[in-house]
Image (cartoon, helix red, strand yellow):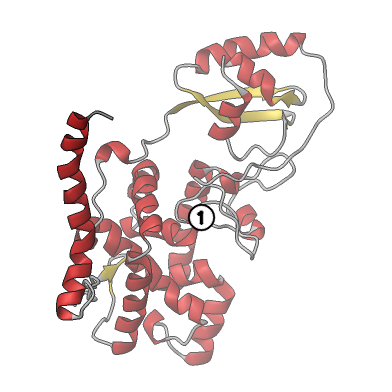
Amino acid sequence: MTTHHRHRLFPILILALTALLAPVAAFAQNGLAPSVPFFDVPAQATLFGETVPLERQDLRELLDESLVITAYNYERVILWMKRSARYFPYVEKKLRERGLPDDLKYVAVAESSLRTYAYSSARAVGPWQFIEATAKRNGLRVNASFDDRLSFERSTDAAVSYFEVLYKKFGSWTLAAAAYNAGEQRITNAIAAQGQKNYFDLNLPIETEQYIFRILAAKIILSNPQFFGYRIPASLLYPPQVFDRVEFNAPREVPVTLLAKACNTTYKVIREMNPEIRGETLPTGHHTLNVPRGRAERCKTAFPELLAREPSKSRKTGHPRKRRT
């Protein structure tokens, strides 16, 4: 390194060292470490259009706990912000179409952090964390060939329909959300045993009592992330996924690689656009799948031609790859 370059770097090093030592100097001077920011619970809040009675100390503390745990989890909140830019538009559209509260989108945040490949110890799967029985009751396929719980579009459609059913049954969105978490029968039994129909007056398992406030904390933070110190440039948010839908009939089992070839793309792309596919082949029958934008017509034209030349192969099944987002 030349003397000239060393002289240019010296002031930069001095500034960097000063910045690093400033907190230490402040501590040495007054005996106090730099202040940790804290956030108070709002005086009023609504969730799903219903008022949360935060004048009650027990409820304020539940919300306070959720806000503190969440607001300081920087990695989680940053990923929430990035993923919500990708996934919220579809959820918001479906909720608007059915006239349901927009706040229901935060349920997916509390359930899975908007992760497609989310798995729980209770065997709940996907962004909306359906267990198998509930998924099947709401029209999702869970079999050797497909697991629709992993499809964001299909599972969102099912979740929206299920929320409608729960609201009609319980007459309250907070109770509907509690039933989504704890199960319909548990909430029905609690109402009958305790003689209370207000969610906030029911004694429920602690996970379910905290659940509503985890959803509310997600709403408060994501509605105004700048207040909590989160400022992410729009260019760093995840863009919505763009694809076309293609419908076709498979007269026999079809390798996913053949579909990829028909669409002039790769096996990897088809699997990532259709995470519900569990194996390497598609079963006989009618299928509607996502393909890269602009490839649908090519796919529909090329698919039967390639299929006619493809020898029948034995079916292979596998498991979905667990990805972070």
- Residue 63's quadrant in the figure? bottom left
Q: Name the residue carrying label 1.
A: 128
User: In x, y percent, where is residue 64?
Assistant: 31, 77
Q: Is residue 320 above or below residue 171?
A: above
- Residue 267's quadrant in the figure? top right
User: In x, y percent, where is residue 92?
Assistant: 34, 48
Residue found 29% across the figure and 82% down from its top: 60
User: Is residue 166 among what the camera can see?
Assistant: yes
Residue found 24% across the figure and 42% down from its top: 233
Residue found 58% across the figure and 15% down from its top: 300
The three-letter amino acid code for the residue at tag 1 is: Trp
Q: Residues within 10 Å of mark 1 (few under 14, many from 20)?
A: many
Q: Is residue 196 above or below residue 3?
A: below
Q: Nearer the viewer, residue 9 or 158?
A: 9
User: Is residue 171 among what the camera can see?
Assistant: no
Q: Is residue 198 above or below residue 7?
A: below
On the rendered structure, is 150 left or right of 30? right
Q: Residue furthest front?
A: 3
User: In x, y percent, where is residue 38?
Assistant: 24, 73
Residue found 24% across the figure and 28% down from its top: 2
On the rendered structure, is 265 left or right of 95? right
